[in-house]
Image: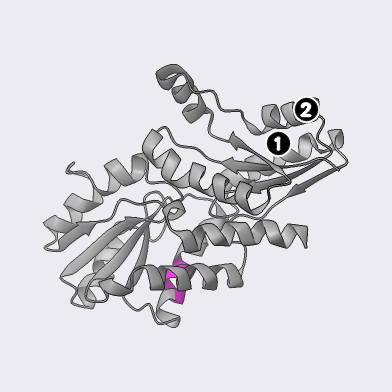
Amino acid sequence: MKTAILVVSFGTSYEDTLKKNITALEDEIQKAYPDFEVRRAFTSGFIMNKLRKEMNIDIDNVETALDRLKNDGFDRVICQPTHIMNGFEYEKFRDMAESKSHMFESVVIGEPLLYGTEDNENIVDCLKEIFKDKEDSAVVFMGHGSDHPANSIYAALDYMMKDRGFENGFMGTVEGYPEIDSVISFLKSKDYKNIVLTPFMLVAGDHAENDMASDEEDSWNTIFKNEGFEVECIVKGLGEYESIRKLYLDKIEKILN
């Protein structure tokens, strides 16, 4: 059976972080499964249009990618998302994949990075190890956030970090809860003076560069500094860490087993 792995991401228009995160993950998947063909799709129409207009880069959406795979004679497709959680973008991807599933002998839809308590434990343990040399600072993760019910996972992760020995880890979001004001309140109650800001997103794109690390008046970097904190920004997407890329590989292995 001719099999492809379609790696589906929200996407980014930042070419450097695209290579360091999404391409790095896709390359590792291809190396792990040399008998399968790995292909790419994005779910953000805005990003795909921007890449096409500004950089002359064409990336398929999920439906077009599946049409190409059908035309190229593939019988089975493993659709593995890089989305963090089961939110709006994951649901959009899943619906697109399901709409094309009749064209193949098998279409398997993988889980997002965080799909249950075990996944949460795994990523907290990874983050604890990655930032173990920052124990004298509060490590503040900037998640995207939304009004989707899955947004509750951010507060669960914040709680779980403390529960699993990562007491100086804190989770906030740009567009959901916990909000930055809540994070600031917690940090002040614990008398933290130094903080590390880093994105809790697959790629370090627009949110990481502008909403988090820039010197703009409303960036997290500026807001925390105005509240009296010493701030270090680490502008790296989750996809740059080998241990977190392995969590995605484990998702594919789970499908195959």
Question: In the rendered image, is residue 14 in sight?
Answer: no
Q: Residue at x 19, y 73 (%)?
A: 192
192 or 25: nearer the viewer = 25
The amino acid type found where label 2 is placed reads Asp
Quadrant for residue 6, please give it.
top right
Report x, y in % for residue 34: 68, 47
Identify the image quadrant of the C terminus.
bottom right
Total number of numbered discs in the rendering: 2
Q: Is residue 83 left or right of residue 80?
A: left
Element assignment for label 1: helix
Discs 1, 2 touching: Cβ within 8 Å: no
Report x, y in % for residue 39: 64, 37
Q: Residue at x 37, y 46 (%)?
A: 204
- Marks 1 and 2, how far apart at CA: 19 Å
Report x, y in % for residue 144: 42, 50
| Label 2: how many Cα within 10 Å (few below 14, some 14–19, many 20+) | few
- Looking at marks 1 and 2 on the same chain, the residue that comes earlier in the sequence is marked by 2
Identify whether 125 is placed above or below 22.
Answer: below
Which residue position is annotated with label 2? 72
Report x, y in % for residue 60: 61, 28
Q: Main secondary structure of the magenta part?
A: helix
Look at the image and give the residue range highlighted in magenta: 155-160
Q: Is residue 136 left or right of residue 46?
A: left
Question: In the rendered image, is residue 133 in sight?
Answer: yes
Which numbered disc covers residue 186? Answer: none
The amino acid type found where label 1 is placed reads Met
Which residue position is annotated with label 1? 96
Identify whether 229 is placed above or below 234.
Answer: below
Element assignment for label 2: loop
Identify the image quadrant of the N terminus.
top right
